[in-house]
Structure formats: structure tokens, C-alpha cells
Image (cartoon, rainbow, N blue to C red):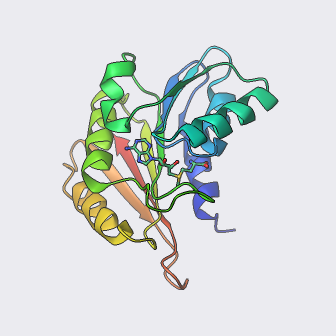
Amino acid sequence: MLKGILQFAHQLLEESVERGETVIDATCGNGNDTLFLSKTVGDDGHVFAFDIQEQAHQETKALLTKHGKSNVSLIHDSHEHVEKYVHNEIGGAIFNLGYLPRSDKRIITKPDTTIAAIDAILNRLKKNKLVVIVVYHGHEGGKEEKEAVLNYCMALDQKKFSVLQYRFINQVNHPPFLLAIQKK
Ligand SMILES: C[S@@+](CC[C@H](N)C(=O)[O-])C[C@H]1O[C@@H](n2cnc3c(N)ncnc32)[C@H](O)[C@@H]1O
């Protein structure tokens, strides 16, 4: 069976993240990936979850409380400042680009800050671990970000990183796709 984009994103992280590690949700939104990462690293691990919107923090906090999870730091700051908050080596990270569903569609991830954040996380990423990026690009501003992130990924040195693109090529309406960067 072919996995859907989000399903495949979680599968990749489930297979590479270990219990006890420090991981990052770079765009916590409604908290679904934060909860998934919190369960994956277990009580001895830690999740740093970034978002610039108060609404995203409220949603994520409520979801984590409902599931009794306390191994998460919610960071109300833009993800390119990751080095200010995360001092450990990183066991994995996820980005969901675009806007918060059912919210203000003008508040979106942007090419420069997204790339700066990916770059900062790759610097601290452990060998063989993954940064997974789910690229939504149908909204206004999405095309520019998609192109910038693809160009950045294609220029990564193949001696240092492997980069996978996973996408369905027969879907209509700008389907999201996945990029997975593995550090060698
Ligand atoms: C597609 S949503 C994330 C969905 C989320 N992963 C979930 O499971 O619900 C994108 C999120 O990125 C956030 N965002 C936009 N720019 C950001 C930035 N510079 N740093 C951190 N988060 C940002 C938005 O506020 C929004 O909540």
C-alpha cells in the first residue's frame, strides 16, 4: 500500500527517532505532530514545538494535556531561532509548511525563515537522522516557498545528505508532497 504524505512522514520518523531523544516540531499548529513526537520519544525524551501563533499554542497545549504529555516545550518564536532554545543534538524534526487550518490564511511559513530553520536544525542533527518537510503549496505564497525549499534541498551536498522527494503525480489541485533529508 502506498502511504499518504502525512502517514509516510510519521513512518519515517517512527523508524528513525529513538526513545529519549530530543526532537523538533518546527510548526506545531494544532499539535498533531507534536503529540506524535511526544509519544515517539517517550517520557525520557523531549520535544521542542515552535509556532508564532498563540492559537497554535493553545490547541497544542490542550491536545497534550488531554493525552497527559509533559515532555514538550512550546516555543512562541519563529523556528529559525532554534539555536536559542535547543542545545542538544537533534534526533529528528518535522515541518508542515503553509497556514494553520481553520485560521488566518495570511499567516504562512516563508521561504527565508523556513530555509534558515532547516539549516540550523541540520547543523545540530545527529548522523543518519531525518528532517521531514511536508510542503503545502496551493495557497498564496506557497509556490515561492516550494521553489525555494526545493532549490535549497537540491543544492545540499550529496556527500553530506541524502534527500528524498515523495509525491503523487496524478493528483489535482496542488497536492502536498514530502521532502526527507537524511544526514550522512
Ligand atoms: C500547516 S500548519 C502546521 C500544522 C501542524 N503540524 C498540525 O499538525 O496541526 C503551519 C504552522 O506554521 C506556523 N508558522 C508560520 N510561520 C512560522 C515560523 N516562522 N515559525 C514557526 N511556526 C510558523 C503557522 O502559525 C501554522 O500554525
Which residue is at the front of the view, 103 or 72? 103
Asked if residue 39 lies left or right of residue 157, the reply is right
**Where is residue 113 drawn, in percent x and y?**
29, 46
Q: Is residue 85 left or right of residue 166?
A: left
Q: Position of residue 111 (x, y in %)?
A: 28, 55
**Drawn side of residue 37 relative to residue 166, left or right:** right
Relative height, residue 21 to residue 33 (above, below): above
Residue drawn at 38 percent across, 28 percent down: 126
Residue 110 on image: x %, y %: 32, 54
**Looking at the image, can residue 131 be seen?**
yes
Residue drawn at 62 percent across, 25 percent down: 41
Q: Determine the residue positioned at 49% across, 62% down.
A: 105
Q: Would residue 184 be visible to someone looking at this image?
A: no
Q: Nearer the viewer, residue 3 or 119?
A: 119
Relative to 120, 171 lies left or right: right
| Viewer-proximal residue among 37 and 163 | 37
